[in-house]
Image: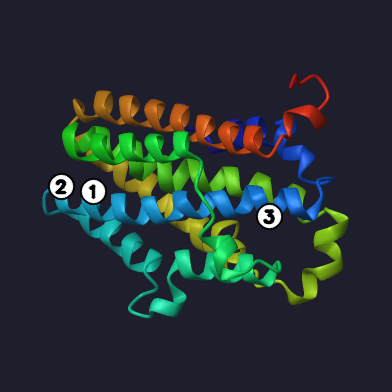
Amino acid sequence: MADNARTQTEYLADKKLQYLEHASLDVLKRIFVQYRYFTISYISDLALLVYRLPFGNLRSLLADFLNDELGNGQHEQAHQRIYDDFLVSLGMSQDELEADAHQTNLRLLGEISDLVMKESPWYAVGLRGMGGECLCQVYLAAMHAYFMKNPAIQEMKDRLDQRFWDIHTGEIDIEHRERLREALMAAVDRDPAALEGLVGGYKKSKGVFDRFWDNIFEAADVASHVPGKKD
C-alpha cells in the first residue's frame, strides 16, 4: 500500500503539480509559504510520537529523525529554519512568511496532532512516521521535479537556498524512508497485530496530506489553469 514507486507515479501524474512548471513566481510563493505550517506541525507531532512509543529500536530511530529535523543541536540547521531560508531566497519578506495560514489546513493539522495523542501508538506511527518520512518525501520529490523546470525559478536558481530540497529530495530522506521501512517490518514480525494500526494511520495520513495540498492549490487558484479542472 505504501509502495514508493506507485506513490511516486501517482504524484508525478498530478496535473496540479505539473502546473508548477509554468506557474508565475507569485503563485509559487503563495503555494510554498503555506507548506511551512506543515513542516512546523510535523516536527511537533514527531516529538509527541517519540514520547508515546515504548523504549526500543523504533523509538530511538524516530528520535534520531527528530534530531535531524531540529538541526542536530544547531537551530540554524533546523528544517523549518532552512525552509524559511529557501523562501527568503525567493524574495519573500519575514512578514510574508508569517502570512495567514489556510484555516482549513490548520484544522487538518490540529486533527492530526490530536490523533497522534489519542489513537494507539501504532496508528500514530502510521500517521506521522510512515506519513511523514515515506509519503512526504515522495511528494516533495515530485513537486521539486516540476517547479525546478519553471523559467522563473531557473532564472534565480544560482541564488536559491536549496538546502531544504537537497535533504528532502536526496539521499538523506531516502535513507530515512528505507530505515523506517526496515524497522517497521521487524516490528510487525514481532507483533503482527500492529499492522492494523499502521495501515489505519497511513490511510488517514494519505487522505489528510492530499486534502492539505488540494486546499493550498485551490487557494492559489491553480484549478482554473489546469486542463480538465473546474474553478
Can you identify the residue that label 1 sits on? 49
Q: Is residue 24 left or right of residue 118?
A: right
Can you identify the residue that label 3 sits on? 29
Q: Is residue 20 left or right of residue 47?
A: right
Which label was assigned to residue 52? 2
> Whole-percent x and y of residue 76?
45, 79
Q: Secondary structure at mark 1?
A: helix
Q: Secondary structure at mark 2?
A: helix
Instruction: Tell me which residue sits at (53%, 48%) in the image.
Output: 137
Q: CA distance from mark 3 to mark 2?
A: 36 Å
In primary-sequence order, the first of circles 3 and 1 is 3
As shown in the figure, which amino acid type bears the numbered disc 1? Answer: Leu
> Whole-percent x and y of residue 37?
46, 51
Instruction: Tell me which residue sits at (54%, 55%) in the image.
Output: 99
Q: Secondary structure at mark 3?
A: helix
In this view, 6 is above or below 179: above
Q: Is residue 200 visible?
A: yes
In primary-sequence order, the first of circles 3 and 2 is 3
Q: CA distance from mark 3 to mark 1?
A: 31 Å
In this view, 34 is above or below 83: above
